[in-house]
Amino acid sequence: QVQLVESGGGLVQPGGSLRLSCAASGRILSINNMGWYRQAPGNERELVADITYGGATRYADFVKGRFTISRDNAKNTVYLQMNSLKPEDAAVYYCYIEWTTWERRILESWGQGTQVTVSS
């Protein structure tokens, strides 16, 4: 019903930057919330940041001041600008959306994940 295509992960040195993107496509009436979660080996998946259709944002304490989430509603795309990356930010980052179908059902979908590695 919906596809989420993530891009932008990779290897970066500590202090560096990366920008993640996630584009949603399919039979989507609207996307309510969009966000990014991450999961490091041995850890549970945790919220990094999310953003509502109207642009209200929420950040985990460990990324405040370093990461910025944004979205382009016309493109059904969410972005995560990650600055001042630390080794502990290394994880698989997953895109998440809460969306409404044309039948007015509210569903959740996840991307396949993109690896972020922070190492010198």
Image (spheres, rainbow, N blue to C red):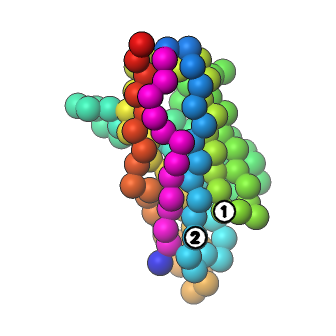
Q: Are marks 1 and 2 in contact (CB under 8 Å)?
A: yes
Give the answer, above or below, for where 120 lies relative to 38: above
Dot 2 lies on which element? strand
Asked whether the viewer can see residue 65, the reply is yes
Mark carried by residue 76 = 1
Q: What is the magenta range?
A: 2-13
- Depth check: give the residue in front, 2 or 44: 2
State the residue lying farthest toward the left. 42
Dot 1 lies on which element? loop
Q: Position of residue 33 (x, y in %)?
A: 61, 56
Residue that appears at 42% across and 44% down:
114
Give the answer, above or below, for where 104 lies relative to 91: below
Which three-letter amino acid code belongs to the residue tagged 1? Asn
Q: Is residue 27 left or right of residue 41?
A: right
Residue corresponding to mark 2: 25
- Depth check: give the residue in front, 92 or 45: 92
Q: Is residue 57 left or right of residue 12?
A: right
